[in-house]
Image (cartoon, coloured by chain):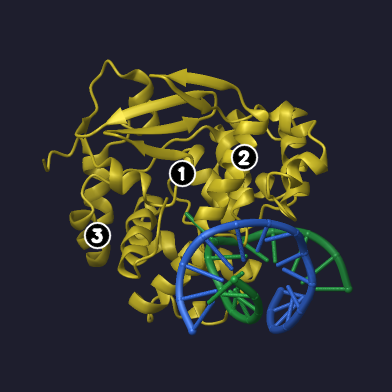
Chain colours: A yellow, B blue, C green
Amino acid sequence: MHNITTINLNFTINSGQVFLWDKIEDAWCGINGNDLLVVREPFQIVSAQRQARHFFRSDDNLERILRQISKDSLVGMAVKQFSGLRLMRQDPFQCYISFICSSNSSIRNIRNMLKRLCVKFGDRVEFEDRQFFTFPQAYRLANATSRELLSCGLGFRARYVRDAARATDSGKIDFEYLRKADYRSALEILKTVLGIGNKIADCILLFSLDKLESFPIDRWTQRILQKYYPKIFDSVTGKSLTEKKYMYLHEKIVEHFGPYAGYSQQFLFKLERDLNKKNWL
DNA sequence: TCATCACCTGGAGA
DNA sequence: ATCTCCAGGTGAT
């Protein structure tokens, strides 16, 4: 049960990384790009499940990472409390669009927007007599009309989504290039897309492009830093996070939490949201 | 460079 | 029921 290879799907899926997952009977079903993933608990990664291994980042040296981030005592506590919580390696395009949609919205609402995009622009797949819709290809969203996007409830994000899809479709944004690029360069490139600022860029980098030093700083993360680390992160006081402040904070964060700060963030985020009884999916 | 403010929408809380 | 408020931010002034 406390084997380090055992994944707790409930913790993992309900930690704000993904939006298109549903628990159906005893299985968790999720959309990842063009794939439908179906997993059941207790879930243990075995070598044969190549796709699942990749998705759940089983290539990470988890023992080393958890040891490293547990040097911080609060993170260490969260690692024990949420044993089995993992970072996922999502389809980059889906992750990119998902977090662009997350802007000034709630998890429930984000999920609704994305589901409607899948139904309207994705492909229908069947599994065990149930219907699912995969995530749209970039060209489908790039060619969508604003009326169609608005009908999915995107609101002011419709323009962002269409422009972002066009950037991918035209090759201006190349995820495999970004995956190989260093953290800072990749961040700057993502931020050239309308609707992507520091926070959303960090989410995309952490959840789909293997940048484990990313530490998205949002309302919750700010709150966590202020509440538990008032001395170290005393610069989080103001409401607005300016560009300079964000960069400075990120430096301090990596200095304190280490090169796997992204994993730390995931445990802390889960801890604080649960503590405040916030809903997930 | 920094602080304010508007922004679509729908769910939760009063 | 009806209304207000706000939600994992960003872009424009």
Q: Nearer the viewer, mark 1 or mark 2?
A: 2
- Answer with mark 2 or mark 3, whichever residue precedes in sequence: 3
Tell which subunit mark 1 falls on. Answer: A
- Give, as a three-letter code, the residue at label 1: Val
How far apart are the two marked residues, 1 and 2, measured between alpha carbons? Answer: 15 Å
- Answer with mark 1 or mark 2, whichever residue precedes in sequence: 1
Image location of residue A49, percent across then percent down? 30, 19
Tell me which residue sits at (25%, 18%) in the image. Answer: A47
Quadrant housing the N terminus of chain A: top left
Total numbered labels placed on residues in the image? 3
Q: Is residue A141 left or right of residue A31?
A: right
Instruction: Indicate the secondary structure of the residue bearing disc 2.
Output: helix
Q: Is residue A263 left or right of residue A170?
A: left
* Category of crowding for the residue at label 2, using alpha-carbon neighbours closer than 10 angstroms: few (below 14), some (14–19), many (at least 20): some
Q: Are the residues at dot 2 and dot 3 in contact (C-beta closer than 8 Å)?
A: no
Q: Nearer the viewer, mark 3 or mark 1?
A: 1
Tell me which residue sits at (34%, 67%) in the image. Answer: A277
* Category of crowding for the residue at label 1, using alpha-carbon neighbours closer than 10 angstroms: few (below 14), some (14–19), many (at least 20): many
Q: Nearer the viewer, mark 2 or mark 3?
A: 2
Kindly tell me whether residue A162 is visible in this rendering. yes
Tell me which residue sits at (28%, 55%) in the image. Answer: A69
Q: Nearer the viewer, residue A257 or B5?
A: B5
Residue at which label 3 appears: A78
Residue at which label 1 appears: A18
Tell me which residue sits at (59%, 42%) in the image. Answer: A114
Residue at which label 2 appears: A116
Image location of residue A12, percent across then percent down? 33, 45
How far apart are the two marked residues, 3 and 1, measured between alpha carbons? Answer: 20 Å
Q: Nearer the viewer, residue B3 or A248?
A: B3
Q: Nearer the viewer, residue A248 or A121?
A: A121
The reply to whether label 3 and label 1 mark residues of one chain is yes
- Give, as a three-letter code, the residue at label 2: Arg
